């Protein structure tokens, strides 16, 4: 019976002297994720791998689902632990496990053996040959193929014996928390949750800011953003969501500035506010879901005009993705259905009929001078009075 999981990690294996930082972060992320599963587990680090061992009854599917939501894991192997490591007993347990996992279908296999217990009755090459012979004797559908086997059979002899034949692909990437912190501009759309997920996959800890414009945007539009943050928190871990009331600023810009520049000027204020909150929260960068050419505010010139107000790097992980490619990821991470719910978000109401697509930064700065009287106080107030939600996975 499966009682443990072997976690193999890929990229963090090559981090040299800092490797332990990555391993410890991965152990913490695995442990946090397993807290939400039924059962008790112990997690051990050992020679480039992590073992999760169940100490009580548990649900195998639930654990695998949990581990396939943790960045930094390349493969997950359900393992049978054999306490009595007498070779015949190990073979018997191995074949039982293979029958359960593989059924009756014909398959080819190769045995891989590892022995850290040097006093064991057989050496690794003998374990391979003898276990292979045992499998063929007990499973008529099995044949050996040492070059391209369907099934890789692992037998590892340590304090106890470990046998496993199944390898489930993990998400890859780096454990969250190994790459500093970033502020995601999270709207209710399809792109920004995907952008946040992609940065978290590289180990970045995410916070988020949403610009809300009641009554022009509804409570349900806001709830949608909270829901999206919750869905991505299944991968990223808890997210502090800063909800900024943008209504007064938006109306003021609408009153004072040329309407074809509204979108860009509003976006520049969003970036400024996001950056101020990011600094306060010790974030080192901003993230948006922009993609070149998607809309008027995402031409190269428009992106330059929004970047011009930021001194932090602005990461746009979907910048070169087609909408379809972004949707594929949104479906995979389960945000798509929520993103397409039809509640207006901030920008849709104040969109000009003919927005500028090649904004001139100087002209923009001149238009913004018309806001001088009140805008600083309005920005300050919006930041001070923001609502902060601690969004956690369910
Ligand atoms: P999304 O890009 O999330 O699908 P969208 O395409 O409607 O939504 P745009 O208006 O194109 O969004 O804005 C581009 C980016 O600006 C978004 O990806 C998001 O990062 C940010 N953004 C837009 N509106 C808001 C908002 N109301 N609150 C926070 N961030 C926003
Ligand atoms: Mg978009």
Image (spheres, rainbow, N blue to C red):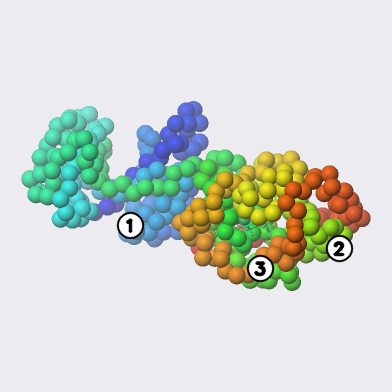
- Would residue 277 be seen by someone viewing this image from the given angle? no
* Quarter of the figure with residue 342: bottom right
Q: Residue at x 52, y 60 (%)?
A: 335
For discs 3 and 1, the disc positioned in front in the rendered view: 3
Mark 3 / mark 1, whichever is N-terminal: 1
Q: Position of residue 286 (x, y in %)?
A: 66, 46
Is residue 344 toward the left or the right of residue 148 in the image?
A: right
Q: Position of residue 61 (x, y in %)?
A: 34, 58
Q: Position of residue 13 (x, y in %)?
A: 43, 34
Name the residue that disc number 2 marks: 255
Check mark 2 vs ligand 1: CB closer than 8 Å? yes or no: no
Where 154 sits versus 385, above or below?
A: above
Q: Nearer the viewer, residue 158 or 219?
A: 219
Q: CA distance from mark 3 to mark 1?
A: 41 Å
Q: Secondary structure at mark 1?
A: helix
Q: Residue at x 41, y 51 (%)?
A: 67
Q: Nearer the viewer, residue 143 or 77?
A: 143
Name the residue that disc number 3 marks: 344
Furthest residue toward front: 354
Please tell me in which quarter of the rendered image ligand 2 is found.
bottom right
Name the residue that disc number 1 marks: 60
Q: Secondary structure at mark 3?
A: loop
Callout 3 touching callout 2 (CB < 8 Å) = no
Where 393 sits versus 121, above or below?
A: below
Mark 1 / mark 2, whichever is N-terminal: 1
């Amino acid at each position: 019976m499966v009682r443990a999981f072997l976690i193999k990690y890929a990229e963090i294996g090559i981090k040299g002297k800092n490797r332990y930082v990555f391993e410890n972060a991965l152990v913490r992320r695995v442990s946090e994720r397993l807290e939400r599963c039924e059962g008790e587990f112990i997690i051990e680090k050992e020679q480039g791998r992590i073992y999760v061992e169940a100490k009580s009854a548990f649900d195998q599917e639930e654990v695998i689902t949990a581990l396939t939501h943790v960045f930094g894991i390349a493969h997950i192997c359900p393992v049978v632990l054999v306490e009595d490591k007498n070779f015949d007993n190990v073979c018997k347990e191995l074949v039982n496990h293979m029958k359960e996992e593989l059924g009756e279908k014909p398959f080819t296999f190769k045995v891989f053996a590892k022995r850290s217990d040097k006093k064991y009755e057989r050496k690794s090459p003998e374990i391979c040959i003898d276990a292979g012979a045992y499998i063929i004797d007990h499973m008529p559908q099995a044949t050996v193929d040492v070059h391209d086997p369907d099934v890789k059979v692992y037998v590892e002899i340590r304090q106890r014996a470990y046998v496993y034949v199944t390898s489930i692909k993990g998400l890859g990437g780096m454990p969250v928390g190994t790459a500093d912190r970033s502020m995601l501009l999270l709207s209710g759309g399809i792109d920004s949750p995907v952008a946040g997920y992609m940065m978290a996959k590289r180990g970045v800890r995410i916070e988020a800011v949403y610009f809300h414009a009641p009554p022009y945007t509804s409570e349900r539009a806001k709830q949608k953003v909270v829901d999206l943050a919750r869905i991505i928190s299944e991968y990223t871990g808890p997210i502090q969501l800063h909800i900024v009331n943008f209504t007064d600023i938006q109306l003021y810009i609408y009153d004072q500035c040329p309407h074809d520049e509204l979108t860009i000027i509003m976006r520049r204020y969003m970036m400024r506010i996001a950056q101020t909150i990011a600094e306060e929260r010790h974030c080192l960068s901003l993230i948006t879901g922009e993609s070149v050419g998607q809309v008027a505010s995402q031409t190269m010139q428009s992106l330059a005009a929004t970047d011009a107000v930021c001194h932090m790097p602005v990461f746009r992980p979907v910048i070169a993705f087609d909408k379809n490619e972004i949707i594929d990821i949104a479906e995979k991470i389960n945000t798509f259905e929520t993103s397409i719910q039809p509640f207006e978000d901030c920008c849709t109401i104040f969109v000009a009929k003919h927005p500028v697509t090649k904004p001139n930064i100087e002209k923009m700065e001149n238009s913004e001078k018309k806001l001088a009287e009140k805008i600083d106080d309005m920005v300050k107030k919006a930041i001070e009075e923001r609502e902060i939600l601690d969004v956690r996975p369910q």
